Amino acid sequence: MLRIVAGRLPQIAVTLALLSLAAYLAIGAMPGDPISLALMADPRLGPADVARMRALHGLDQPLLARWWAWATGVLRGEFGYSRLFARPAAEVLWPALRGSLVLLGTALALAAALGVAAGMLAALRPRWRGAVDAVALLSQALPAFWLGILLIILFAVTLGWLPAGGAPEGEGLAEALRFLVLPVATLAIAHLAAYARHTAASMAEVLQAPWITAARARGNPESRIALRHALPNAAVPLLSLLALDAGSLVSGALITETVFARPGMGKLLTDAVMGNDHNLALLALLLVAATTLLATLAADLAQRALDPRLA
Amino acid sequence: MTRLRLGLALLALLAAGALAAPAVAAWLGVDPELPDLLALQAAPSAAHPLGTDELGRDILVRLLLGARVSLAVGLAAALASTAIGLAAGLLAAWRGGWVDAALMRLADGLLALPSLPLLVLLAAMDPAAIGLPRGGAAADVLRIVLILALFGWVGVARLARAAALSVLARDHVRAARALGVSEARLLRRHVAPALAAPLTVAGSLAVAGAILAESTLSFLGLGIQPPAASWGNMLANAQTLVFSAPLAALWPGLAIALAVAGAMLVADGLREAQR
């Protein structure tokens, strides 16, 4: 196990370095650098000022040199300042990250629980298979932004039970929960399908295994066979699905955050990229990529630990 | 089989609608891109079967025109992703070694990135900077297809690689090699047919993904630019009017859901048929 970790960590580091380079170059290719944006804001600036400001901010250097300066800074733990918010990038990132963790954490936990339950239902009760398949298909086909709009029309406009979006105005858990219901529902419905489909397929496969027949022959009740014998084995492939979703825990949900006007990583990441905010965008992108890669590694290790045949 | 038929029927219905768009527009006597200030947000009537949007444009005709964009983007992006993915996966499995490692690490890297913010970043880039035409609906479609293919090939490549590896390890391939069959013929005659089944499934899933991604980008204002109609940009306008005209938000979303569900049903049906 230690050998796998020692082998994979350098690969992850190289992948991250190359990703940051690619992202740096891509953001550099966006129209308008920080100085031209400053020029638009203040017409009194002349060509001499522009040249001085470019030199001051290092923008006269080639992109590669700028990336190198940024990368060595990151290795020293200096993530730089956010251009949009004029504050340290790490400081800007934190509230958005917290918002996304709460939103996505709740939604993914709900999606995984409901999805696994629906998948088990489909595998154990063939009568329900068609219904579960239909729900899974629907939840994958509905675009998240439309689902969000529909939920707003129903629960905020027509019934007036829940707020249409925004951040809670008052204090208290109940108020925060009221604002969380609709976005969590939107995300949970969108993510549920993958869990349901994978659980159904892998449960159906496991139930054919000889040890299930053996467990039945020993007189185990069906409920015990399903929960204690089949589910733990069927859950092994689900770990890699969870690992892929771990990245979205950090990357946020741009669409849901936009529709419900909630602060979060998806919105921050997009704003940073569109606003030419190198430091903030790269920090957020690297955080997401590192989380996904490390979660994949963790899922690999967990799968090996759970299933000795893989080791 | 029923799923395959249902999916194909849905897609055929949308394709028929897309082809009929100009005829319907002529028959109703409306210009889908011209604002009509005397009929803003009109209720459904004989002249406008689904009513009009916030600029008085006919919603039905714009929906049908949106089907053209969605189907074109979906099919073209899926074809491009499948072609690139097939080439990359086949190359990785056949050459092995550092080619395999480099391609698969590249795929890992692309999978580890948050796809939506990156799509947004690429969609916001100046198309002229990378030598693409600027302006017009056709240029927008081309740009979106290229961006989607840039990410879409990863899943296909992994599938193609896995399938190719399992074929290449089989005895009949080793026997063919021993008989002196050339590598090109080996790939064409023995490996490619084995890839056809998984790739058709992956390809139809890619159609669904591309339709959804295009509508998302257009919804965010980065895809097909108005006045050209796309389901995504119709929804973006409808969202701002959700309180006064909730019905206008219903149709484009329903159209997206039908198109995506159609492509997914085709994928499901193909997978079932191959079992």
Image: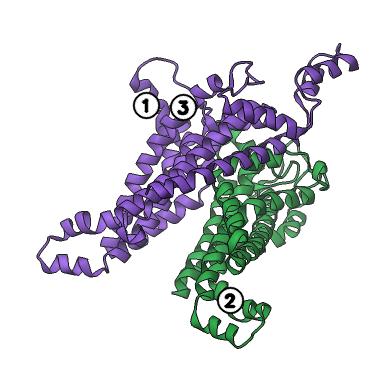
Chain colours: A purple, B green
**Chain at tag 1:** A
Q: CA distance from mark 2 to mark 3?
A: 48 Å
Q: Is A163 in front, or is A10? A: A10
Identify the residue at the far left of this view: A219
Q: CA distance from mark 3 to mark 1?
A: 13 Å
Q: Amino acid at mark 2?
A: Val
Q: Is B32 in front, or is B223? A: B223
Q: Residues within 10 Å of mark 1 (few under 14, many from 20)?
A: few
Q: Quadrant of residue A25?
A: top right
Residue B51 visible in image: no
Q: Amino acid at mark 3?
A: Gly
Q: Residue at x 67, y 38 (%)?
A: A21
Disc 2 versus disc 3: nearer the observer: 2
For residue A27, above or below residue A170: below
Tag shown at residue A177 = 1
Left or right of B130 in this view: B200: left
Identify the residue at the far top of this view: A44
Instruction: List x then y, in percent, for residue A297.
Output: 44, 46
For residue B26, above or below residue B187: above
Earlier-in-chain disc, 3 versus 1 = 3
Instruction: List x then y, in percent, for residue B51.
Output: 64, 44
Q: Residue at x 68, y 47 (%)?
A: B230
Q: CA distance from mark 2 to mark 1?
A: 54 Å
| Label 3 close to label 1 by CB (< 8 Å) | no
Instruction: List x then y, in percent, for residue B92.
Output: 60, 63
Tag shown at residue A99 = 3
Disc 2 versus disc 1: nearer the observer: 2
| Label 2 close to label 1 by CB (< 8 Å) | no
Residues marked 3 and 1, same chain: yes
Q: Residue at x 45, y 50 (%)?
A: A139
Tag shown at residue B191 = 2
Q: Amino acid at mark 1?
A: Leu
